[in-house]
Amino acid sequence: MNAPLFKFGLFNFDVSLIVAFVIGIGFGFALERGGFGNARILAAQFYFYNMRVLKVMFTAIVTAMLGIYYLSLFGLMDLSLVYISETFFLPQVVGGLILGVGFVIGGYCPGTSVVSFATGRLDGLVYILGVMAGIFIFGEIFPLIENFYYSTNMGSLTLPQYLDMSYGMIVFFVVLMALGAFAAAEWSEKKFASKNPEKSI
Amino acid sequence: MTTLVRKITHVFEKDAEKVEVKSQPYSNPYLVGVGLGLVLLAAFFVMGRGLGASGAFSTLITVGVDKIAPEHAINNNFFSEYLGDGTTNPLKDWLVFEVIGVLAGGFISGSLAGRVRKGIEKGPRVSSAKRLMYAFIGGGLMGIGAKLARGCTSGQALSGGALLNLGSWAFMMMVFAGGYAAAYFIRRQWI
């Protein structure tokens, strides 16, 4: 089989929008199951007593990463046709910091706020309006920060390329790191168990 | 029209009653993680691209700006990129349709588990008005940060993370750093 299927012309753009809707349903379903429609669960990540964000995110990253690795290893998927966004190091680092602060203040990220709104939470809706306001402000000041936005461009660059190591080796290290993070998360939840909001939901 | 409104409110009322009776706990996070990872893998396998969220809102904002001040939108390099070349409707966008799916999927999952209910999520020590103000400010920072970083937790951390993208991993570390750094100052909202 030749994957990514869309890149090999198995279906056209209009059909890809239906695919987008179906994949979105899976995405939203998983986020809600994980408790990510609830700002208290998401914010708890930053106070160490409920580490669902870390557990779900790293399990998902490891699952998809292993899937990609083995699919391309067995020649079922051409990884070079998967879109890897270019690295713009400094803007991404600064953007990540701002986003992290916004995460703990607002209690959501864009995807989870949609789920929160879908399950009836008013703070989710207000958060979405905030995101849109932020994007509008960003668009308006874009001419002023355009130089910074395009600075430190390193092209499309992966960790194996940057560290000059084999893809499999990096995959192995990420799995190890995730297992270590899970152990730390379980320990942390036990230590701070008394504050866990999941008990009062 | 009024009957329709009444019907809709009735549905919501019925939901609220059901929720109070049985609201199931959230699923095992590792199982959810595998599920989410498989959804992401499906996106790579079928489409050759990852998931996203903030991009859909950028499109919505751009369409709004274009409606009100079309010349302003076309002269701005940020907005004009989301407008495309003008041959297709900018709303016919992969991420816009994906986010509509997220809305549906979240509602389906929440309904099945009896977790759809009107309300505001906050800690016990903060007023609703203050919580909503924080939600708006936090969302605003998220919007600015996500655009600067070229993606949010979905597009960069999750999708780029699985692809071992260097910029995505640097971004992800900084998200956690920013969150933990600010957490202390905002703790009254949550605990």
Image: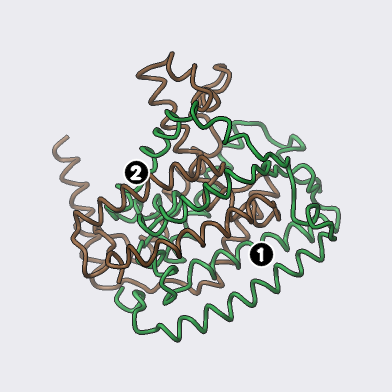
Secondary structure beneath dot 2 equals helix
Chain displayed in brown: B
Residue at (29, 53) in percent of width and height = B134
Q: Which residue is mark 2?
A: A130
- Left or right for B13, reference B142: left
A162 or A50, nearer to the observer = A162
Mark 1 to mark 2 CA distance (whole Å) = 32 Å
Cβ–Cβ under 8 Å for marks 1 and 2: no
Quarter of the image for the C terminus of chain B: give it.
bottom left
In which quadrant of the rendered view does residue A11 lie? Answer: top right
- Near mark 2 (Cα within 10 A), the count class, few <14, some 14-19 or many ≥20, is many
Q: Chain of mark 2?
A: A
Q: Where in the figure is residue B58, as x and y percent of width and height?
A: 46, 35
Q: Is residue B174 above or below residue B22?
A: above
Q: Where in the figure is residue B52, as x and y percent of width and height?
A: 54, 46
Callout in the foreground (1, 2): 2
Of marks 1 and 2, which one's residue comes earlier in the chain? Answer: 1
Quarter of the image for the N terminus of chain B: give it.
top left
A101 or B60, nearer to the observer = A101
- Near mark 1 (Cα within 10 A), the count class, few <14, some 14-19 or many ≥20, is many
Q: Which residue is mark 1?
A: A63
Residue at (51, 57) in percent of width and height = B175
- What amino acid type is highlighted by mark number 1? Thr
Residue at (81, 48) in percent of width and height = A1
Q: Chain of mark 1?
A: A
Residue B147 tag number:
none
Q: Where in the figure is residue A113, as x and y percent of width and height?
A: 39, 52
Q: Where in the figure is residue B71, as x and y percent of width and height?
A: 43, 13
Q: Is residue A78 above or below residue B80?
A: below
